[in-house]
Amino acid sequence: MIRWQHLLKKLSTDDPVLQEKLSLWQAHPHKTPLALIQGFSFISANQATLSYFETEYDAFVNATPYDFSPRIQSSGRNSVEFAREMILEAIAGNNVEFNWLHMSQQGNELPTRINLYRCYLQQQPVVLVELQALNRRNQMRETISDGFAHIPKEILSTTLEESAEAVYITDTDNQILAVNKAMCRICGYSAEQLISKTPEFLEVITHNMGEETECQIALKQRGFWQGETWKRRSDGSNFPAWQSSRKIVTEDDAHYNVNIFSDISTKKLLETQLTTRAMYDTLTGLPNRFHLKQILNSALEKLKTDPLALGALMFLDLNGFKNINDSFGHSMGDRVLQLVAARLEAGCIEKADIARMGGDEFTLVLQDCSCKDEIQLFAEQILSLFESPFEIEGQKFFLGTSIGIALFPTHSNQAGQLISLADTAMYCAKKSLPHLVFYDKEMSLAAELKLQLINNLRHAHSLKQFTLAYQAIVDLHTNQTIAAEALLRWQKSPTEYYEAADFVPLLEETGLIVSIGQWVLEQACVQAALWRAHYQPDFRISVNVSPLQLEHLDFIDQVINALEMSKLPAEALILEITESALLRQPEQARLTLNRIKALGVSIAIDDFGTGLSSLSRLGTLPIDSVKIDAEFALRLNEVSGQKLCNAIVQLAQALDIHFVAEGIETQQQKDIMTDMGQGFAQGFLFGYPSSVENFTQAFLAEKRLA
């Protein structure tokens, strides 16, 4: 809940009474259930609120107050309209207090006293919500009769006559004695045509002649019945109806049946539409994940009658689709997905059931296959569907796909597990050509090991298993150490040690890199400040920044806080950004880099030459240096490798920025790079990444200041 405490401290108000409450809540951030609303959605909450609603942070954030409420409040008001009205009143500057019935995520009723306060978060109005549980058992309820006993019979008769629901009353011989206007309107008959008739001609017969209906049996046994039935209009058309029937015995022992029904055609149509929406993807019209499970369950059920039959579930993920979304927007991405769905349908609809799982993932279910080779051949045909581009408004989009295949019943006879196994195979297919892989047990073992590693990573920071190693960056011409790169290491146990390449991708995949990256930045700045104070006043520190960190809303604040906390001058900090970070959200990246540059912090492009950076874009970014990837150093003994490195050096010189050659391991490599121009280098030739103590002893001890 660090995020909550951080937001709570940033809240401001011009109300002195509320300011006192804020101070109290800031001192005890998780005691009183509190939440923040921006617009009409929750943007954060403390642990007390999450416990109150029996939910998790990720499920709560971006939800609305009426997502945790019944549709109608006890006052009779619509929850959505009422909640929005109260929030708007609070945003207008009024302190709002009212009772509200919430529902926890587990379905428990939560009578609550709500207080809404307007605050400001970074000059933007937000609503601070205070929740107080009400004990409904302590509230005495006044017993009130329904009041009908005191209403004149004329009013009741008129009410019945004008009711929107059809009403007809029959006697013991099942003859209609009275009908209301709605009965005539819905069925298309006049009162004269209905009275004294039996209602059978209004019913759609679904039972054998002479047999009693379910309604008639229930009226005899229990005296009442309600349920769905079918009626027939005067024009011969049928319609579904919801009917309630009750037997009434008067004081003089006369028996009557009162029947009330309503036309539920519109409701049925809506249910059909909702079912369609629940079963089919709205974008492509293909079956969705829920429908896929039904298809799989049906296919698995058929296997029980033919044990020798073979089926397959293919899990497809599009290669290169994210670039379309990032470059052309989600609207264009949606249109491409529609073309993909149409091409898949045209190519295999007679052979397989197609479904869209969501995003850029599709599945195919094959049944009645003769052998694995047949499935392999069909999968290759699917791959061939992506050989030609998808064209929209003259723009051609080239996509590939990765296919993971799980066989049933060979690999599993459970729909959910089959989807999981095919998904696992698909991720393996992404890593190897021709992007087509059948599932095997080794994949699950690898996936389990990965999951175990992720779980261990989640606790590594709190267990203080992360450390930093430092590698020297030297001036090629003077051989002086001018900076160090901070490198993250994971000492899981005395015998288990991981370098960054082994676990940082998992940190990025889980999003943990944001908090761990902040810790790295702070630790590196503190250490650099100490080295500057005791050894080398102009020493600098270089820190790697993940694309996720660069995109995080608080990243600039994190950099400022790290500098202020460590008292490190901004010019002593270098942030290393990969080329891929510039491609994800180019405009946002440019704005963020400009703000970093304005602080006085230097920016380096890491692993330069391995990405796809546009030279025109590179010239517009506030970059101070490029770090030539270590792969180029390995090729310095070749003429072509030297030419490539020289081209990068000349590019850096043309842009008036520095270069740092990574991976320098031999004197020959150093000499070649030195001859290319003024620059810097790092690599095993100068020193391996080492602890603070070893780095200080090797590179800075002789420079100790008096």
Image (tube, grey):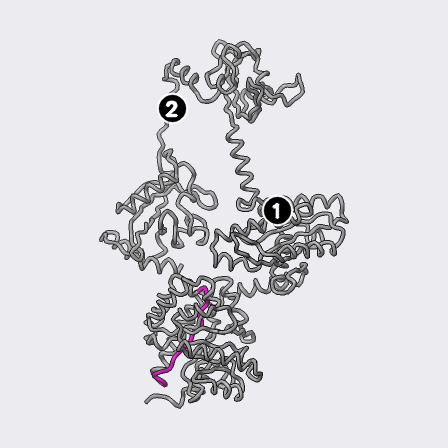
User: Percent from the top left, x then y, of residue 472?
Assistant: 45, 82
Residue sitting at 36 percent across and 88 percent down? 704
In the rendered structure, the answer to whether residue 429 lies left or right of residue 680 reads right
In the rendered structure, the answer to whether residue 96 lies left or right of residue 286 reads left
In the rendered structure, the answer to whether residue 25 lies left or right of residue 269 reads left
- Taking 169 as reference, is 305 above or below it? below
The C terminus, quarter of image: bottom left
The amino acid type, in three-letter code, at marker 2 is Ser
Query: Is 248 colored magenta in this rendering?
Result: no
User: Percent from the top left, x then y, of residue 28?
Assistant: 33, 57
Residue sitting at 32 percent across and 49 percent down? 127
User: Percent from the top left, x then y, of residue 146?
Assistant: 39, 23
In the rendered structure, the answer to whether residue 635 lies left or right of residue 512 reads right
User: Percent from the top left, x then y, of residue 136?
Assistant: 38, 39
Chain part drawn in magenta: 533-548
- 132 and 372: which one is in front? 372
Other-residue count near label 1 (Cα within 10 Å), few / some / many at <14 / 14–19 / ≥20: many
The amino acid type, in three-letter code, at marker 1 is Leu
- 685 and 598: which one is in front? 598
Query: Is 542 colored magenta in this rendering?
Result: yes
Mark 2, residue position: 145
Real-space Cα separation, disc 2 to disc 1, in angstroms: 52 Å
What numbered label is drawn on residue 292? 1
Quarter-of-image position of residue 239: top right
Quarter-of-image position of residue 110: top left
* Label 2 element class: loop
Which is more N-terminal, label 1 or label 2?
2
